[in-house]
Amino acid sequence: MSRPPLPRLPLPRLPRLPGLSRRGLLRGTAAGAGAVALPVLLAACGEKPGGNDNEVTVGSNSSDTVPKKAFRDAFDAYEKKTGKTVEVHTTEHNEFQQNITRYLRATPDDVFMWFAGYRMQYFAEKGLLVDISDVWQGFSGFSQALKDQSTHEGKQYFVPYYYYPWAVFHRKSLFDKQGYEQAKTWDEFIALAKKMHGDGIPVAFCDKDGWPAMGTFDYINLRLNGYDFHKSLMAGDEAWTGTKVKKVFDLWRELMPYYQKGALGRTWEEAGQGLQRRKTGMAVLGMPHPGQQFPADERDDIDFFAFPEIDPAYGQDAVEAPIDGFLIAEKAKNVKAGKHLLKWLGTPAAEDVYLAGDPNNVAVNDDADTSTYSPLQKKSAELVAGAAQISQFLDRDTRPDFAQTVMIKALQDFIDDPNDVDGLVNRIERQKKDIFSQDAG
């Protein structure tokens, strides 16, 4: 069966980071730390003492059932093809992310899962990643734009594997039954939330994990203030105390009465289950988050619409579409074996195996097989293809120390008390100045 043509993707304007082209995403398109070790580099080949070319370890943040099995399928295919062994060390996703710096500075695995763009470049700048430019020389099917998202100062450090968009997800059958219409503007969105609330069906909301609420903040900011302001704010170049940021929180507060109660005690898995059980009406999440909570025979009932327009000057131009993939830590024990695995993971065959087990993401390689895409995958690709700009997500578009130590608590404070916006933005700005004034190295 021949593959349908892949849509062209928009060239986002990334003032600080390399851009993704329209074709970039589809054409091209965190673990606990151990004891600190100081391995000695071998001069000739970059191997570490004790390395074994036939064995490679992978640090995985894919602790949820669906992606965990899909990755195991991919690694099993690699083992069958090469005769080599892949040992996967899986850590709960949030724990991995919160401990990533300690992990990289201690005794990391040969290969680990992480994110493209700023989150990769940040650790490359700190000298915690291995240059894999030689691996990229053998790749095909990746656009130059996607290569840029894997590059820092002219060197490649990241192998992209898939991406997924954030949007407003819901059940088609529930909307049909209740007579709900997808919202295109903020006023329509609030009216829809109010109608759901009147029907006893709240808007799903969660932030126990610390990052889900970032998606809503990002989208309101993108729709209200535009993509360039979002990038500047994430880079530390805009004041959080300005009226533009305050207006983001003011608008967000309009949605608060229609949310599920107890968001700070609810995981993203539980929020996805609420949609699946028809206990909630819609949720701002990434494509895998509800997708992993629906049984296979119900996945075709998942639908979404782009986050609504707020200011017509920006419309619905920007889409959050994070890219996940693989890297090698500078302190990896066996760099040679790690590079061998990365060479295979960069092939369309590797993506095909993974996506056969996890239909909640979209391939990044031009030659990956899209003929079996679900309607949700096809619509996701079209959403990103129609975007004028593509962002990665708040905690990927800014410094990890700022995202983890400041923004997680700040957004949770806002959820707990949405009425003290002045105090909130003053605290964020004060901490932002302290962190961004530090030596990035």
Image (cartoon, rainbow, N blue to C red):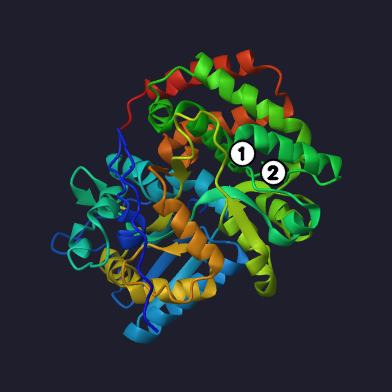
Of the pair 136 and 191, the residue shown nearer to us: 191
Marks 2,1: beta carbons within 8 A: yes
Measured as percent of width and height from the top left, residue 207 is found at 66, 41
- Residue at (49, 40) in percent of width and height: 316
Q: Is residue 2 left or right of residue 132?
A: right
Q: Which mark is residue 231?
A: none
Name the amino acid type tagged 1: Ala
Of the pair 270 and 298, the residue shown nearer to us: 298
* Quadrant of res 109: bottom left
Measured as percent of width and height from the top left, residue 225 is found at 47, 26
In the depicted structure, whether residue 309 falls above or below residue 65: above
Residue named by callout 2: 206
Of the pair 412 and 109, the residue shown nearer to us: 412
Can the viewer see residue 330 in this picture? Answer: yes
In the depicted structure, whether residue 256 falls above or below residue 114: above
* Quadrant of res 433: top left
State which tag comes first along the sequence, 2 or 1.
2
Image quadrant occupied by the N terminus: bottom left
Name the amino acid type tagged 2: Cys
**Element type where label 1 sits in the image:** helix
In the depicted structure, whether residue 15 falls above or below residue 379: above
Residue named by callout 1: 213
Measured as percent of width and height from the top left, residue 4 is found at 38, 72
**Element type where label 2 sits in the image:** loop
Q: CA distance from mark 2 to mark 1?
A: 7 Å
Can the viewer see residue 108 in this picture? Answer: no
Disc 2 crowd, CA 10 A, few/some/many (<14, 14-19, 20+): many
Q: Is residue 214 left or right of residue 324?
A: right
- Residue at (44, 29) in percent of width and height: 313
Q: Is residue 256 left or right of residue 200?
A: left
Image quadrant occupied by the C terminus: top left
